[in-house]
Image (cartoon, grey):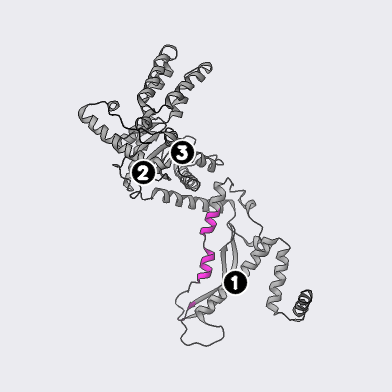
Amino acid sequence: MKGNVQVARATMQEAVLPERVQEALGQLVGAAKEGLLALSVGVGLGVLSELMEEEVDDVVGPKGEHNPERTAVRHGHEAGEVTLGGRRVAVERPRVRTADGDQEVALGTYAHFADRDPLARVVLERMLAGVSTRRYPRTQEPVGEEVEAQARSTSKSAVSRTFVERTRQALGELMSRQLGDMRLAVMMIDGLELKGRMNIVALGVTTEGIKVPLGLWGGSTENAIVVTALLSDLVERGLDPEQGMLFVIDGSKALRKGIRSVFGDVPIQRCIRHKERNVLGHLPERDRPAVKARLRKAWAETDHPRALEQLKGLASELDHTHPGAAGSLREGLEETLTVVRLGIKGKLKRTLESTNPAESMIDTVRTTQRNVKYWSSGEMGLRWTAAGLLEAEKQFRKVIGYKDLAKLAVAIERDLTTRRRSALTDTPIEEERIPALV
């Protein structure tokens, strides 16, 4: 074996390599001194050059051979650019024109590598990961001094323009999603404040447990007009307002009013965590642990009348000592027990009794926006939020307890039927008990 290797080496030393190959190898040796990645880039650019020349041969025919039937001819070379690792790199590209000289013939190889979309994706990912425009060049991989000296699209202004374009595409993508074929079991609505501006976002949960960002709408506050505009837009994009859905909100009256105006008398679950914070905020520190324990005990009940009785009893007790806390507890009290009234138990109950899934999505959006110090316009806030929502979607998993969502949809349909019958007969909804399904 050792002898064969020595023979091979001797043969290579005796062989005379073409001058072009020797020149290329000499350049690669220089690139290798700058690191393996720089060497790979040098090889890759050389391969790209050869691929473009081969495509020219396929289109025009071998160089130097006369062919009267050819449809295209060579037309020299010119400077071009390809995308490489979040930058634009200069290359020399061959040109081809039709035989009559009327128009340019596009080369597929060059068009593929010159596409700017990979550059836009890299810029978007790095900006959402927290890289600022002025520090963007420092995140670039080392590709060799010669290549780097000719690279473009890495300046602060260039990165900013690319990011604006990409986030504008993200906003368009999110707001044009067609929802006609989507069967939702749950919709969660929450607000994201951006230093004086408010973006209302909607998160849908399908009957298979898949979370889907549905849309967003901007405004100055979390008011009913903005919520109605958001929900109306979802309906215009195909969402069926007649399908039975559970709406989960943080307790805002504006959200409730907007839901009622677009979807009618649908079941609404108020987030028990928001309600808990609101009630405890009216209490002194020493009284909070006891009241908190009683609130959670009541909300942990699976029997609706018993849970309702415990909460009303607590409110009555608070009337004497802390009337503000009592009033806060009574406001929307029954809507904190909607999932219990629907007969939902177990893991799905814990998932749907709060807006935690929506808040988790919003936390991801806030993380992507952590470097923004100034919001120049509402459009900027919408672009960043849309990009953050689509980034959060990549990390989504099915909601906990998703296997029982189909049963939830059945329970909601029964609840809607009960509400309609109650409206016609003036029968309180509490008397129409819904059997536990989960």
For this rendering, which residue is in front, 413 or 256? 413
Q: Where is residue 161 in the image (x, y as percent from the top left)?
A: 52, 52
Residue drawn where x is 41% and y is 26% of the image: 301
The reply to whether the magenta stretch includes residue 220 is no
Mark sitting on residue 187: none
Distance (Cα) linking label 1 and label 2: 52 Å
Left or right of 207 on screen, residue 107: right
Element type where label 2 sits in the image: strand
Residue drawn where x is 50% and y is 18% of the image: 290
Q: Marks 1 and 2: CB-CB under 8 Å?
A: no
Element type where label 3 sits in the image: helix
- Per the image, the residue denoted by label 3 is 357
- The answer to which of marks 1 and 3 sits earlier in the sequence is 1
Q: Where is residue 175 in the image (x, y as percent from the top left)?
A: 39, 48
- The answer to which of marks 1 and 2 sits earlier in the sequence is 1
Distance (Cα) linking label 3 and label 2: 15 Å
- Per the image, the residue denoted by label 2 is 184
- Is residue 281 something one can see in this rendering? no
Distance (Cα) linking label 1 and label 3: 50 Å
Q: Residues within 10 Å of mark 1 (few under 14, many from 20)?
A: some
Residue drawn where x is 53% and y is 43% of the image: 368
Say if 149 sits above or below 338 in the image: below
- Per the image, the residue denoted by label 1 is 49
**Magenta-tinted stretch:** 97-122
Q: Where is residue 172 in the image (x, y as percent from the top left)?
A: 42, 50
The reply to whether the magenta stretch includes residue 100 is yes
Say if 154 sits above or below 225 in the image: below
Residue drawn where x is 64% and y is 56% of the image: 141
